[in-house]
Image (cartoon, helix red, strand yellow):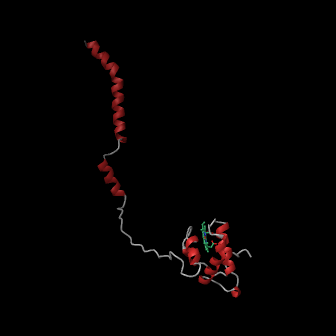
Amino acid sequence: MHAKWIHIARVWAAPVLAAVVVAVIGSRYLPASAQSQTAKQTERVPPVRFAAVDVTLPSGETVFPPGKGSEIANANCVICHSTGMVLRQPALTVDEWHAEIDKMRNAFGAPIPADQVDELAHYLSTINGRKLDGGPSGVDHQAN
Ligand code: HEC
């Protein structure tokens, strides 16, 4: 009987000791309770406040100003960008607007029929036109 207990103690001493060591060391690395973690975080992180902000963006023109050819512009020139991209440009001559429209067609694939380009170029020159003697335009002839 006595010898049996000694035998059991010998067999289990090492595993039990190892388990105690692992438990003691491991407990240091156990995650703290959620409560104490929250407490730590609020200690370190300054409080974040969310406030409602009212932002009013400038309203852009959604259609081109009325005139002969404006319907062509409305149908073809706001597919990829706003009217502002066209209206807020330096004034161009009819020919320059023609070249600009051709650039939209050739370079970017604007699906405007070729037989409407003239009328559109005239329309654009009436709303944002430049006389021929006004000097070179800053747009599209920059390399010249
Ligand atoms: C298929 C798309 C598309 C369509 C349709 C389109 N454009 Fe553009 N347009 C662009 C892109 C892309 C730019 C910007 C180019 C850049 O950033 O260099 C642009 C820019 C412009 C500019 C600024 C100057 C420049 O050359 O970059 C003008 C003016 C212009 N477009 C006029 C027109 C007109 C007029 C029409 C109608 C015939 C039109 N666009 C239709 C794609 C398009």
The answer to which image quadrant residue 17 occupies is top left
| Residue 133 image position (x, y, % from top left) | 71, 87
Q: Position of residue 51 (x, y in %)?
A: 36, 68
Residue at 36% x, 37% y: name it: 26
Whether residue 50 is visible to the viewer of this picture, yes or no, is: yes
Q: Is residue 128 above or below residue 100?
A: below
Q: Is residue 42 left or right of residue 122?
A: left
Residue 15, given in percent of the width and then of the height, sits at 35, 25
Q: How many marks?
A: 0
Evaluate whether residue 139 shows in this view.
no
Residue farthest front in this picture = 115
> From the viewer's perspective, is 62 left or right of 144?
left
In which quadrant of the rendered image does the N terminus lie? top left
Depicted 93 relative to depicted 5: above or below: below
Left or right: 19 in relation to 70? left
**Hey, which quadrant is residue 57 in on the image?**
bottom left
**Quadrant location of ligand 1?**
bottom right
Q: Residue furthest right?
A: 144
- State which quadrant residue 29 falls in: top left
Q: Who's the residue at 34% across and 30% down the image?
A: 19
Q: Nearer the viewer, residue 77 or 85?
A: 77
Camera-nearest residue between 127 and 17: 127
In what quadrant of the picture does the C terminus appear?
Answer: bottom right
At horizontal 68% and vertical 74% (from top left) the residue drawn is: 99
Question: Vertically, is 14 above or below 74?
Answer: above
Please provide percent x and percent y for residue 135.
70, 85
Give the residue drawn at x 28%, y 13%.
4
Q: Nearer the viewer, residue 77 or 29?
A: 77
